[in-house]
Amino acid sequence: MARAEQRHNEDRVLDSGALRALAHPLRVKIYDILSQYGPQTASSLAERLGESSGATSYHLRALAKHDLIQEAADRGTGRERWWERPIGGVSFASPDAMTTPAGRAATQVVMTEFLRNRNDQLLEFVNRGIGGEDAMWQEGTLISTATARLTPEQSKELALKIMALIDEAVDNYRNQSGENVRPVTIRADLFPLPEIGGQS
């Protein structure tokens, strides 16, 4: 847990400029695809997103300007540039951004679009039907919710334990390739519920 806390204390906290650069639905999608599927070209992103390669190229340059993404040094040619998201955690919760209305608005757009994309992926999986996946993948799927009554300190401890498990899996398998290997999204939501009826 201490390692997870130390590691995530070093996550890049996006400043107002980076948040504003990311605060566009298509840019959030591009950023998320690079996070989940690895390096892409403007053309491959355009095909996946139903956009022109000119549009995706424009948005890639805007993201690169704020070091949100970078060119993949070991790929591509002079005519075909590959882009990747740098390794490491990123936090959208910037205290600097929260001091201005524009910063708060940019943070809200980024978080809303990011969560919308991830929720769309979950709903698409559910709508395909878990039975549509290979039996081995069905056994490795977890969609679960639970409720506990915790103090802020207990919530932080649980969050660190969960992050330590996720970090271990990411470190061990980030670049794995081979038969039957595919990207898997790992979700963790832990937050206090609003009070209702005088109860917390």
Image (cartoon, helix red, strand yellow):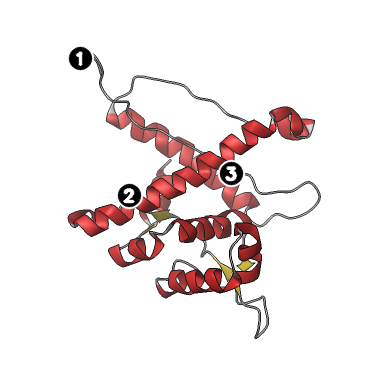
Find disc 1 in the rendering and name its residue.
198
- Say what amino acid the circle numbered 2 marks: Gln
Packing grade of label 1 (10 A; few <14, some 14-19, many >=20) is: few
Q: Which amino acid type corresponds to the residue marked 3 in the rendered image?
A: Thr
Q: Residues within 10 Å of mark 2 (few under 14, many from 20)?
A: some
**Lower sequence index among marks 2 and 3:** 2
Residue visible at 44% across and 35% down?
189
Crowding near the residue tagged with mark 3, few <14, some 14–19, many ≥20 C-alpha atoms within 10 Å = few
Query: Circle 2 sits on which residue?
Result: 108
| Quadrant of the image occupied by residue 137 | top right
Position of residue 163 measured from the top left corner of the image (x, y, whole percent): 47, 41
Q: Position of residue 31 (x, y in %)?
A: 50, 59
Q: Which residue is mark 3?
A: 185
* Mark positioned earlier in the residue sequence (1 or 2): 2
Query: Is residue 150 found left or right of 1 in the rendered image?
Result: left
- For the C terminus, the quadrant is top left
